[in-house]
Image (tube, rainbow, N blue to C red):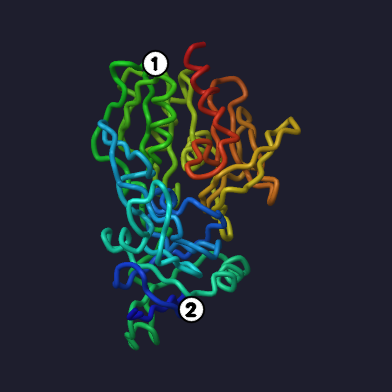
Amino acid sequence: MNLTKATLILDDGSKYEGFAFGAEKSVTGEVVFNTAMSGYPESLTDPSYAGQLMVLTYPLIGNYGVPARTLQPDGISTFMESNRIHANALIVSDYSHKSSHWNSAGTLAEWLKEENIPAIYGIDTRALTKRLREHGVMMGRVIIGNDPKKILHPSFSDFKYDEINFVDKVSCKEVIAYNESNGKKRVILIDCGVKHNIIRSLKKRDLTVIRVPWDYDFNRMEYDGLFISNGPGDPDTCDKAVQNIRKALDGDKPICGICMGNQLLAKAGGASIYKLKYGHRSHNQPVRMVGTNKCYITSQNHGYAVDNNTLGKDWEPLFINMNDDTNEGIRHKSKPFFSSQFHPEACSGPTDTDFIFDLFTEMLYK
């Protein structure tokens, strides 16, 4: 086997050397880590990873291959969370060149090459993750092969993660309807980079889903409820969505948000958002429902959080992260508006909080 050398360089100058197993091209992105033990097909296709170099802390990756990239008749992926890979690169410790699984349609390396996504294995991901935990997420560059100019003098000036509106890059560009003939209630879905299992979860509850671009003024449409999806990047780049959501807050129709949706709903209500040191990306984040002793294990993928101290008088925290006490959801004190920072649709991850979709659906009938 001919091995191609690959190097990861962080913007603090630290370097990690390994070998390439995806597309052989060099890329730049924000380096983040995910501590989940499985689910790399779902994570790679999660639009919330747009612009990022994904580090997987679980040491063995690729052993169960990847499922077929089949689509349902309405264009929703059967097994993935979107129709393509969104992460800029993948970084792992040990790549399994051979894979085996009843649902595998090919290897991870084959898929990465098909979609022109570079990947590195042989990296000390434990040491890399410790550095990111101590110093915070930072920009990095994957260099494939021996390019001494890039390795000795990496330049990150062409890519400032926080300044790019990644939501605009991954959102749909036109209105798309799902389940129109069978839906009993009509829900507007603001697509900030929606995971397909959110759409599957809404369809499963006999709802018609009208998916609109992130900056679309949905207030002129007829609907029974509003759903705000997950998405990548800094919520402060999405002011058009915040303005449209703020108009909806004047009414009484149910509103639910997930991840980026939690942050945009909070901003529409007057709260502020701040960037976490290294974010929450895993399947094992414990959250507590405020006012109760109920704790749930959740799937998460976000780098920003709502500042609880800036919530207006009509709003209150709904969930709190039990690891660092950060916000994990909000709710309005009198209107049917609420959200979660975690992913109740999971996929991959635990399904403990799937009831969030039931709560939203119940509100539509009140």
Q: Residue at x 48, y 35 (%)?
A: 268
- In the image, which is nearer the foreground, mark 1 or mark 2? 2
* Residue 50 point in image, percent of width and height: 38, 55
Residue that extends furthest to the right in the rendered view of this protein: 293
Q: Position of residue 73 (x, y in %)?
A: 25, 31
Q: Residue at x 39, y 42 (%)?
A: 239
Q: Is residue 76 above or below residue 314?
A: below
Badge 1 amino acid = Lys
* 263 or 140: nearer the viewer: 140
Residue shown at the point (33%, 40%) measured from the top left: 77
Asked if 233 appears above or below 94 in the picture, the reply is above
Mark 2: secondary structure: strand
Residue 240 visible in the displayed image: no
How many badges with numbers are in the image? 2
Q: Which residue is mark 1?
A: 185
Report the amino acid beneath label 2: Tyr
